[in-house]
């Protein structure tokens, strides 16, 4: 019973990075930009989160700086895909490896590696937290966990119920039509990339500042890639992505609980689980593909106004 | 409530009044914002006009720019500029010891570069090169570990095992893409993580060397290692040259090479015209996996002499970089691979002498990719001024 | 009458190709002004400049006598210029109202999204009513018919405040009846004071509905005349430059049935596309399939070509069995020649050389070497001969990229490849789309020659003129089946009626 409780209580902590990263990807991809750089941007957010926390000690500032830096790094990516019309897959891969190398280098040079953060803990709500069972699950999480839901609501409303959201979706579905309607395709995509990057940076910062409370090179361990897969099988809908993130959170949270329960599983096979599950879900979704294609019509294509032929 | 529809019967007077907005402010507009101006200036695409010499020049400038930026970062990180030039550039090529090391490193690099470029030619983003390499090395090690076959055939058997397992590890994603349209970027990457974890499982587990209890397999026996065919030069490089020739034949001389070109350029059209697209794609991906497996064999039986836990790190992106710079051309890829091998050797020196983490190599590679990818813009597009203001 | 829109001295090039050379145009308020010219004359490019999508290298533009420089489509909209393009610019998953709201000034006002959408829907219903047609603003544009989508486009520009309305080849995708409705509607708009520019290559539309016509040829403006005073022959001369001999259509001598299609059905998701096609094409005849696009022609062509798609029914090729089982390569061996509508998507690989595009037709048969070695020299020399024989212009080097060829020459290259082995069956889908009169005539000559050599030719085209001039028998395709067949000489009215009756 205790195991179950721990499992459920820890799930949000593991789910949040996936959720926020996926949401950032959705914003970017709905505007037609294939954003493979999630893994890299999460690392940037993670590094800066820890660095800022070590320097300033205030989580608010750390998270903000992490988001800002991720957006600045994404500017390079935006420049490449919007202005220079570089192939979006190449640009995304280059971004990831750039961030991996850069964060590793910076972490070592600035001596931020393996420095444990202190004084960060979950929020408590007095007597609510004391409640049996649900107290620990619902009323004893980190602030970012609580903020995730309103963030999702805001983004979902923005995408589907606002004029700017309409514009963003138009740019992603049919940039020719958007351009003819007078929308500045390049600027809209830039905005989407930056907003998405900020969320991915936040996801990474959560991971390092709240979850593990330290920085190690490469600590995201493929979560960015899993988020990319998540977005595909959530069919670019924020709520389905949240569901998927919770699923992954459940799986990851289960692993330490099984060990605690004394279940003997080969260590490295257990570590394979998130990746195997991602693969399995992608295959399952591909097999069950329905008629309506939710993929943004112009995903991955650069837009040039004077294209002939 | 503002007028949504124009008054449907405007008199000529009305229309003149409505459109005669204040002249100067409207006509002599302020400079249009950056993006529309940019998208107006450029005409698009397919410019055969850019001849090879010009393309090579732009490519060269981009690479130099990338290296310059990397050098700047290194200097900022504490490496002295003089050292950088002397030791790491001059020494790497002109010092015999270093040169041999570069050549040694080049063998698996060439194979990985070829593996990447052949898959890319079929429009398949094979990001699973590291996983295929890992399995190649595991298979070769298995042959050694379980002492399969007599001494004389051991090495060739290791080679075949590596070839086959690399190929098989690429089969899954290939079929998933062809039959179910599963995105190969994610599927190959996920398989990488599965492979690397399995490797750890082996070297920390049943295959751990009991002699020193380190996470690596027992050493290969002498006849299980790639021999030298000239003093100081491993036969690995010979193998790489042979493989390069075979790939060049496949891509430039054989009929399949033409098919592959059509698949690369427009798969739909290729199918319509009778090219066996699926067969070609599958073949290309399987060859890619096999080559990566062989690269794993070369590292295990050539450089390391055993199965280690992180031998594959950095090869994945290196392969992509090589294929990208060489534009998927096998001979160019071989040359670029040698340069990347030099980069690896330099990286190790930096690690030893300046404590700069090996991921600096990855950073330099990424910077070069960014510079080259950006320079492509000037090869594909042309800048042209628009009509002068006021006509 | 004051001038609504005026363009003078316009020059525009695309990567070396001169599209507009000192072109000029002027339209007055309250008139329907046709811009007439064949494909490639520069009419669309000129109007794209007027609509702010392209920027000219030289020249001036005046709107209502004010000098103007457009930075983009929204600037054009501010000057009350609206263009309805040949390829609709609609976001398919959006509703009609959402599409129209997208570029409309209303979207820039303060206020809730929902309320703006409601107001937009209201305005749409009102305007549509005034113009005399029905439209449901809540429907997704992907579910609308082509004519309805076009009306959506027109409403879009009118609601954005357009008083200068430019229509680019509006009747290309409509039946005769729908065209009539559309053109009388725009005539109505002109009578109420707007300026309407009608870009077209159809002489008949010009004569019936235009007040003035400006003829363009080769990027230059030739002359502006009154179509009601000018004889048709004179208009043709201005458009084309000189008389083009139309190939004499001698009747074919049909033999046995070469292709027998029975109950061919296919579906795309839940949508039934081909609902049981039955037709016979005989050797030595041209069977012309008429009908506006969207009725399954593309899917029928795809089925015969061998492109992926779920199929039921049979396509028997005389003596060789059902085509359904044959791969695209096998069909090539059966001497089936195809000229697809999508030239650069299906027929040619733009990034590969002319020689390669030619040679790929027979590479599998082993003509240019074996699996081990491709014989490039043989391929190139045969390609050179074919280029000469089929009069493909613009080939400076046989190794140049195929994308550099102009539309007409690209099509001739395709034909040179497809006809290199006397074909048994020819599928020609919109073969002269985008070609000028001269190139079209050349293509038609080739098709007739193939027919006379004994091939069975299936011609699918939305251009009724083309079908009527070439075909020995004409079939009408509506909603995925053949609804009527007419022998030649066929009654154009009857054909048009057949298209409408079953719509």
Image: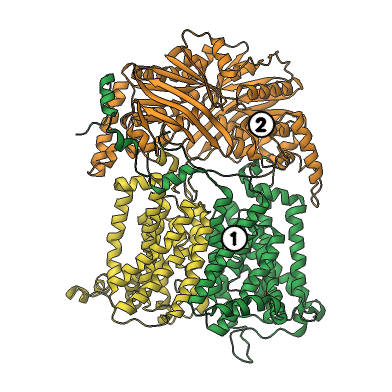
Chain colours: A yellow, B green, C orange
In the image, is residue B209 above or below residue B341? below
The location of residue B229, given as percent across then percent down, is: 81, 77
- For the residue pair C439 and A148, the one nearer the viewer reads as C439
Q: Position of residue C292 (x, y in %)?
A: 51, 24
The residue tagged 2 is C409
Q: Is residue B332 left or right of residue A140?
A: right
Residue at the farthest left position? A127
Mark 2 to mark 1 CA distance (whole Å): 38 Å
- Residue annotated with mark 1: B61
Image coordinates of residue B20 in percent, x first then y, are: 28, 28
Residue B183 in percent (x, y) is at 53, 56
Quarter residue B169 falls in: bottom right
Which residue: 34% across, 35% down?
Answer: B27
Q: Is residue B309 visible?
A: no
At 63% from the left and 90% from the top, the residue drawn is: B210
The answer, for residue A242, to whether it is visible in the render is yes
| Label 2: how many Cα within 10 Å (few below 14, some 14–19, many 20+) | many
The C terminus of chain A, quarter of image: top right
């Amino acid at each position: 019973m205790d195991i179950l409780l721990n499992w459920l209580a820890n799930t949000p902590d593991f789910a949040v990075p996936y959720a926020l990263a996926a949401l950032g990807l959705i914003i970017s991809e709905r505007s037609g930009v294939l954003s493979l750089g999630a893994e890299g941007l999460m690392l940037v957010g993670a590094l800066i989160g820890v660095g800022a926390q070590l320097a300033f000690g205030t989580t608010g500032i750390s998270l903000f700086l992490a988001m800002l830096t991720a957006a600045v790094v994404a500017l390079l990516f935006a420049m490449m895909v919007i202005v220079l019309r570089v192939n979006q897959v190449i640009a995304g891969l280059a971004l990831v490896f750039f961030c991996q190398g850069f964060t590793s280098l910076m972490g070592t040079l600035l001596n931020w590696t393996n420095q444990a953060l202190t004084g960060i803990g979950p929020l408590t709500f007095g007597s609510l937290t004391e409640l049996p069972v649900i107290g620990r699950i619902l009323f004893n999480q980190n602030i970012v966990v609580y903020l995730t839901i309103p963030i999702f609501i805001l983004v979902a409303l923005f995408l589907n119920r606002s004029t700017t959201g309409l514009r963003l979706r138009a740019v992603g579905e049919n940039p020719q039509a958007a351009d003819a309607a007078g929308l500045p395709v390049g600027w809209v995509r830039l905005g989407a990339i930056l907003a998405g990057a900020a969320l991915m940076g936040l996801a990474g910062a959560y991971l390092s500042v709240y979850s593990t409370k330290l920085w190690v090179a490469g600590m995201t361990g493929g979560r960015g890639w899993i988020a990319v897969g998540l977005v595909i099988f959530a069919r670019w809908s924020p709520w389905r992505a949240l569901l998927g993130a919770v699923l992954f959170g459940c799986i990851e949270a289960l692993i330490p609980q099984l060990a605690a329960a004394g279940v003997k599983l080969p260590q490295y096979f257990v570590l394979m689980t998130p990746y195997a599950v991602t693969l399995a879900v992608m295959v399952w979704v591909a097999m069950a593909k329905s008629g309506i294609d939710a993929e943004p019509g112009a995903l991955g294509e650069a837009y040039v106004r004077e294209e002939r032929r | 409530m503002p007028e949504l529809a124009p008054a449907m019967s405007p008199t000529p007077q009305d229309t003149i009044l409505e459109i005669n907005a204040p002249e100067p402010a409207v006509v002599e507009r302020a400079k249009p914002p950056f993006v529309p101006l940019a998208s107006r200036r450029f005409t698009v695409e397919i410019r055969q006009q850019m001849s090879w010499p010009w393309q090579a020049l732009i490519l060269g400038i981009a690479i130099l720019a990338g290296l310059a930026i990397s050098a700047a970062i290194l200097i900022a990180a504490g490496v002295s500029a003089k050292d950088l030039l002397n030791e790491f550039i001059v020494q790497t090529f002109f010092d015999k010891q270093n040169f041999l090391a570069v050549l040694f490193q080049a063998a698996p690099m060439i194979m990985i570069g070829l593996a990447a470029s052949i898959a890319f030619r079929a429009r398949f983003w094979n990001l699973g090169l590291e996983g295929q390499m890992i399995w190649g090395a595991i298979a070769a090690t298995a042959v050694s570990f379980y002492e399969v076959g007599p001494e004389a055939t051991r090495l060739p058997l290791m080679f075949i095992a590596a070839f086959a397992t690399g190929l098989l590890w690429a089969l899954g994603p290939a079929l998933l893409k062809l039959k179910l349209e599963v995105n190969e970027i994610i599927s190959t990457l996920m398989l990488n993580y599965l492979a690397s974890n399995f490797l750890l499982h082996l070297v920390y587990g049943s295959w751990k060397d009991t002699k020193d209890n380190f996470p690596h397999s027992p050493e290969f026996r002498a006849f299980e290692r790639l021999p030298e065919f000239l003093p100081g030069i491993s036969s690995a490089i010979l193998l790489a040259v042979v493989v390069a020739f075979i790939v060049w034949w496949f891509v430039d001389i054989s009929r399949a090479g033409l098919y592959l070109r059509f698949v690369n350029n427009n798969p739909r059209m290729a199918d319509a015209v009778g090219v066996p697209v699926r067969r070609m794609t599958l073949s290309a991906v399987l060859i890619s996996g096999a080559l990566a497996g062989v690269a794993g064999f070369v590292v295990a039986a050539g450089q390391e002499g055993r199965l280690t836990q992180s031998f594959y790190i950095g090869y994945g992106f290196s392969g992509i970089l090589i294929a990208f710079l060489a534009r998927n051309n096998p001979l160019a890829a071989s040359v670029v691979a040698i340069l990347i091998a030099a980069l690896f050797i330099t990286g190790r020196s930096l690690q030893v002498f300046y404590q700069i983490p090996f991921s600096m190599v990855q950073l330099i590679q990424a910077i070069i990719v960014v510079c080259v990818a950006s320079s492509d813009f000037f090869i594909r597009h042309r800048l042209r001024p628009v009509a002068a203001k006021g006509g | 009458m004051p001038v609504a829109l005026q363009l003078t001295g316009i020059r525009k090039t695309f990567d070396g190709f001169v599209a507009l050379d000192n072109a000029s145009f002027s339209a007055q308020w309250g008139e329907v002004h046709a811009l007439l010219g064949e494909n490639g004359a520069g009419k669309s490019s000129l109007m794209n400049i007027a609509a702010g999508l392209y920027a000219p290298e030289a020249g001036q533009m005046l709107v209502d006598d004010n000098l103007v420089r457009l930075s983009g489509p929204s600037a054009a909209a501010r000057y009350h210029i609206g263009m309805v393009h040949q390829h609709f610019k609609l976001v398919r998953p959006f509703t009609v109202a959402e599409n129209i709201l997208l570029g409309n000034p209303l979207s820039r006002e303060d206020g809730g999204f929902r309320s703006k959408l409601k107001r937009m829907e209201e305005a749409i219903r009102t305007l549509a009513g005034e113009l005399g047609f029905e439209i449901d603003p809540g429907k997704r544009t992907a579910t609308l018919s082509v004519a309805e989508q076009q009306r959506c486009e027109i409403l879009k520009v009118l609601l954005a405040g357009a008083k200068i309305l430019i229509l680019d080849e509006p009747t290309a995708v409509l039946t005769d009846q729908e065209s009539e409705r559309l053109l009388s509607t725009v005539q109505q708009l002109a009578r109420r004071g707007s300026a309407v520019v009608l870009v077209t290559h159809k002489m008949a539309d010009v004569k019936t509905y235009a007040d003035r016509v400006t003829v363009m040829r080769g990027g230059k403006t030739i002359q502006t005349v009154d179509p009601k005073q000018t004889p048709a022959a004179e208009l043709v001369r201005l458009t084309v430059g000189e008389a083009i001999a139309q190939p004499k259509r001698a009747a074919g001598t049909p033999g046995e049935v070469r292709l027998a299609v029975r109950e061919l059905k296919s579906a795309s998701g839940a949508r039934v596309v081909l609902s049981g096609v039955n037709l016979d094409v005989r050797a030595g005849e041209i069977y012309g399939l008429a009908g506006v696009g969207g009725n399954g022609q593309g899917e029928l062509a795809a089925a015969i070509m061998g492109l992926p798609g779920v199929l039921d029914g049979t396509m028997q090729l005389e003596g060789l069995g059902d085509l359904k089982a044959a791969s695209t390569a096998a069909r090539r061996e059966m001497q089936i020649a195809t000229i697809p509508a999508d030239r650069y998507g299906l027929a040619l690989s733009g990034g590969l050389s002319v020689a390669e595009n030619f040679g790929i037709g027979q590479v599998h048969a082993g003509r240019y070497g074996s699996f081990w070695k491709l014989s490039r020299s043989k391929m190139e020399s045969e390609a050179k001969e074919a280029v000469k024989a089929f009069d493909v212009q613009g080939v400076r080097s046989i190794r140049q990229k195929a994308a550099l060829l102009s539309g007409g020459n690209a099509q001739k290259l395709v034909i040179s490849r497809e006809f290199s082995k006397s074909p048994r069956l020819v599928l020609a889908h919109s073969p002269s789309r985008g070609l000028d009169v001269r190139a079209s005539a050349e293509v038609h000559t080739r098709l007739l020659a193939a027919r006379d050599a004994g091939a069975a030719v299936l011609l699918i085209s939305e251009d009724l003129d083309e079908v009527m001039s070439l075909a020995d028998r004409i079939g009408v395709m509506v909603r995925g089946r053949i609804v009527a067949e007419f022998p030649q000489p066929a009654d154009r009215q009857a054909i048009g009626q057949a298209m409408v009756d079953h719509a």
